[in-house]
């Protein structure tokens, strides 16, 4: 009986961590909405870049496939969060393409097609070439590479904050949500004993801690408040 109770508690904590991660991820997914309201209002993408949303879409698709039962049974909360993320990123990219200048429109459209071709190639290869465990390893390694590549943005922001001694480009609540999401999925990965989840999210948690420490140091020192959303990457 005690073992059953422990198992139930362990499972409950795992689900709680995954659901919490989904919630904080949703906060990050909706964070670009002010940017796209501006694009819709001005009917122009101005100097905004569409590349972050292309990269995010590819990342969501690969990690979504990793979380599917055909690849990794038992981690459906990874699939749910990335399915929602993929929908948001696709909407953002579609809006961006609609209002971008012709040259940029063609470039982003080509990259969007490339993203789906790469994703289809991954799905086909994983299903036709690999068996169950090999399939999980193949897609898992790809998802880790994809997730780690997404850390380029927070690393750039950290470098920018240190260089400018300003937190103007690092909103506190966005940094906090990123940290809490990574921490939640770090815990989820630990509960599931899945290194393909806890390793990249462990790195994300450390970067989140660094961002929050920098925010605390430089905002206290300068007394300023961040204004520019982190997701508004410029070309």
Image (cartoon, rainbow, N blue to C red):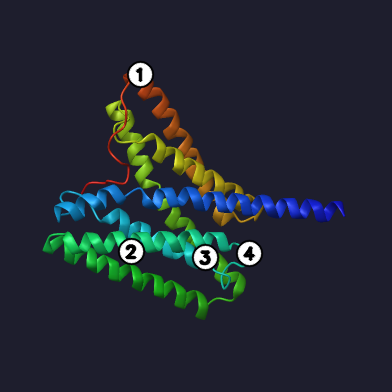
Percent coordinates x, y for residue 216 in the rendering: 42, 25
Q: Secondary structure at mark 3?
A: helix
**Which of disc 2 and disc 1 is earlier in sequence?**
2
Q: Which numbered tag is attached to residue 90?
A: 2
Residue 225 placement: quadrant:
top left
How packed mark 3 is, by other alpha carbons closer than 10 Å (few <14, some 14-19, many 20 or more), is many
How packed mark 2 is, by other alpha carbons closer than 10 Å (few <14, some 14-19, many 20 or more), is some
Q: Which numbered tag is attached to residue 14?
A: none
Residue 213 placement: quadrant:
top left
User: Which residue corresponds to mark 3?
Assistant: 66
Q: Residue at x 57, y 63 (%)?
A: 76
Q: 51 left or right of 194?
A: left
User: Which residue corresponds to mark 4?
Assistant: 74
Percent coordinates x, y for residue 24 in the rendering: 48, 47
Q: Secondary structure at mark 2?
A: helix
Residue 150 visible in the picture: no
Rounded to the nearest whole Å, what is the CA distance between mark 3 and mark 2?
19 Å
Q: Are marks 2 and 4 in contact (CB under 8 Å)?
A: no
How packed mark 4 is, by other alpha carbons closer than 10 Å (few <14, some 14-19, many 20 or more), is few
Q: Nearer the viewer, residue 228 or 212?
A: 228
User: Which residue corresponds to mark 1?
Assistant: 221
Q: Residue at x 14, y 52 (%)?
A: 42
Rounded to the nearest whole Å, what is the CA distance between mark 2 and mark 4?
26 Å
**Which of disc 3 and disc 1 is earlier in sequence?**
3
């Amino acid at each position: 009986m005690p073992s059953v109770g422990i198992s139930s508690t362990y499972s409950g904590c795992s689900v709680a961590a995954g659901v919490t991660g989904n919630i904080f991820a949703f906060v990050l997914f909706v964070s670009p909405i002010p940017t796209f309201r501006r694009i819709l209002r001005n009917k122009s993408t101005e100097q905004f870049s569409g590349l972050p949303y292309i990269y995010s879409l590819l990342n969501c698709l690969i990690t979504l496939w990793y979380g599917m039962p055909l690849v990794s049974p038992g981690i459906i909360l990874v699939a749910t969060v990335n399915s929602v993320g993929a929908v948001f990123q696709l909407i953002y990219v579609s809006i961006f393409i609609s209002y971008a200048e012709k040259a940029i429109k063609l470039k982003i459209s080509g990259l969007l097609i490339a993203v789906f071709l790469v994703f289809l190639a991954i799905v086909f290869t994983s299903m036709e070439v690999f068996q169950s465990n090999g399939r999980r390893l193949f897609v898992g390694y790809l998802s880790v590479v994809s997730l780690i590549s997404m850390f380029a943005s927070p690393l750039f922001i950290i470098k920018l904050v240190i260089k400018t001694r300003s937190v103007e480009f690092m909103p506190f609540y966005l940094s906090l949500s990123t940290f809490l999401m990574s921490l939640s999925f770090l815990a989820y990965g630990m509960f599931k004993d899945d290194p393909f989840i806890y390793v990249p999210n462990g790195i994300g948690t450390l970067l989140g801690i660094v961002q929050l420490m920098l925010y605390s140091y430089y905002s206290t020192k300068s007394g300023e408040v961040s204004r520019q959303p982190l997701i508004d990457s410029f070309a």
